Structures are given as C-alpha cells and as structure tokens.
C-alpha cells in the first residue's frame, strides 16, 4: 500500500448561523487584478492556519528576490516578456517555521488576478496533510468540505473529528481565504472527497460566481507543497468537486455542479 505522503500519486483532470468564523487579519483591501504598467509586482503571503500576514519571508520570482514586510507583502519587478495569453512563472517562498513552497504564479493576458498565497506552517509528521483554499474577493463565502466515506464530514457545521484527528482550522466568511483543513492521521485505507461549496450563492443553482472566483486549493504534506488545484474557469454550479483520495492516491476531479 502506498503511503499518501511518501508516494503521493496525483492524477489531475481537466438561515444557518456561521458564528465563530474568522475574518481577515489584514486591514487593507485587495484588488481583483494587477496589470503590468512598468512598475512593480506586489505579492502577499499569509499563514494558512491563522490567516495573519507572514513577515520576513524570502520570495524569489524569475531570479529576483524580495522579503515580505509586516503586511506579508513582497515587492518584485514585473516579470519580463509575459505571453499575451496564459503564462506562468516559478516562485519559491521560504520562511522560518513554514514549508518551503515552490509554485507557479499564473498570468492571463499579462494580468495577475490573485496576488495572495496562504502558506502552511511546517507539519510535525509525514501523516499530516493540510488542505488550503484561497480565492478572490468574491464570492465572500466559500466553504471547504472534507468527507470520509462511512465516517465524518468536516465543514463549518462540524469542525473536527477524533477519527484521523482532523479539523477545520479556519473558516473564512468575507472573501479571499484562507479556509484550511488539517488531517493529522491520514488513513491509507480510507476514501476521502474534498469539495468547495459557494455559500454566498447557495440559492442560485446556475450561478457562475464560483467559476470566476479564482479559487485555488493547495495540498501540503511531507515537508512540501504536493499539489495545486484550480477551479474550472467556465461553467455554472455551487459546488466545485476538487479531488478524492483512495488508497493513498489523490485523483483530481475538477468538476462544477
């Protein structure tokens, strides 16, 4: 049996109260899109568990480096020679106490639509998995759900389970995230499904807000970023089926319904 984190196989494919939910720690408004105008590029980094800015981190993009300030912001030169269509540039984030994270910053039409990233603190054991949802300013409230077949369903309704020692670390209700779930004892024999529900538009079955949310799910474990899933950019639906885990194998779904 393959262990989830040591051999993490990924097959990618294209009136209820919410009291206690956490709001952003930052006091500034994010913008929806950043376009190159000859100036710099501002990237923002947050703790995936607390939602607070990460200060003093080193960020490298296109061989240019910068350190984050107290607001978690790193100012970098605007990337050169971006393609007119879709483009991606490699980024590395390093900070004491956090997982060193390598990911791609994606641009569309030389525009960056989401400049914030939530990074996981280091995890204590190889059995720990942390799943982090980020998105744009709208919709205000997206909810992360993790279901284990025949067992529990973690969400804002039920935030923890003694089985697998799993809990919802952070429920964000005013946009951007992070919304974070941590599994502390992954069951290699279990079957899991992770999905995102658009709570803001829960009464609109044909809403396209979720597909326009710039939603991004990052899965951390084994001392690294294991995989990134992005919401389908077209279609309607209130639920984004992101991935499943069965027998230690992660299989991307990427479907709106």
Image (spheres, rainbow, N blue to C red):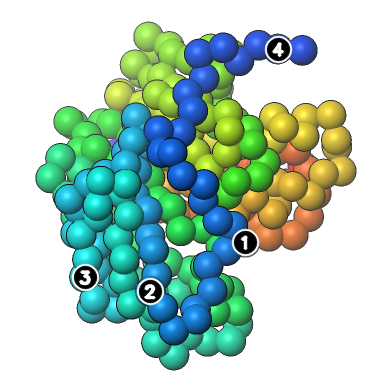
Looking at the picture, does residue 26 appear above or below residue 203? below
Mark toward the start of the polypeptide (2 vs 4): 4
Q: CA distance from mark 3 to mark 4?
A: 45 Å
Quadrant housing residue 185: top left
Q: CA distance from mark 2 to mark 4?
A: 43 Å
Mark toward the start of the polypeptide (3 vs 2): 2
Q: CA distance from mark 3 to mark 2?
A: 12 Å
Q: CA distance from mark 2 to mark 1?
A: 32 Å
At mark 4, the secondary structure is: loop
For the C terminus, the image quarter is top right
Q: Position of residue 179 (x, y in %)?
A: 48, 33
Q: CA distance from mark 3 to mark 1?
A: 32 Å
Q: Position of residue 139 (x, y in %)?
A: 67, 41
Looking at the picture, does residue 227 appear above or below residue 86? above
Quadrant housing residue 221: top left
For the N terminus, the image quarter is top left
Between circles 3 and 4, the one closer to the viewer is 3
């Amino acid at each position: 049996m393959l262990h989830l984190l040591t051999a993490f196989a990924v097959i990618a494919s294209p009136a209820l109260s919410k009291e206690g939910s956490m709001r952003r720690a930052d006091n500034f408004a994010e913008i929806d899109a950043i376009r190159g105008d000859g100036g710099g590029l501002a990237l923002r980094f947050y703790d995936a568990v607390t939602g607070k800015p990460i200060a003093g981190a080193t960020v490298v993009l296109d061989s240019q480096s910068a350190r984050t300030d107290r607001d978690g912001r790193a100012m970098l030169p605007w990337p050169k020679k971006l393609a007119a269509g879709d483009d991606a540039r490699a980024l590395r984030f390093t900070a004491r106490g956090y997982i060193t994270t390598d990911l791609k910053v994606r641009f569309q039409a030389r525009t960056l639509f989401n400049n914030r990233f939530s990074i996981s603190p280091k995890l204590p054991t190889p059995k720990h998995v942390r799943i982090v949802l980020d998105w744009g300013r709208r919709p205000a409230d997206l909810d992360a759900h993790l279901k284990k077949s025949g067992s529990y369903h973690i969400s804002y309704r039920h935030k923890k389970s003694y089985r697998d020692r799993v809990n919802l670390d952070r429920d964000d209700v005013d946009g951007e995230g992070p919304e974070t779930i941590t599994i502390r004892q992954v069951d290699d024999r279990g079957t899991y499904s992770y999905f995102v529900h658009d709570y803001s538009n829960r009464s609109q079955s044909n809403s396209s807000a979720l597909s326009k949310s710039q939603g991004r799910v990052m899965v951390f474990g084994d001392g690294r970023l294991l995989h990134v899933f992005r919401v389908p950019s077209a279609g309607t639906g209130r639920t984004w089926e992101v991935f499943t885990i069965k027998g230690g194998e992660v299989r991307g779904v990427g479907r709106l319904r």
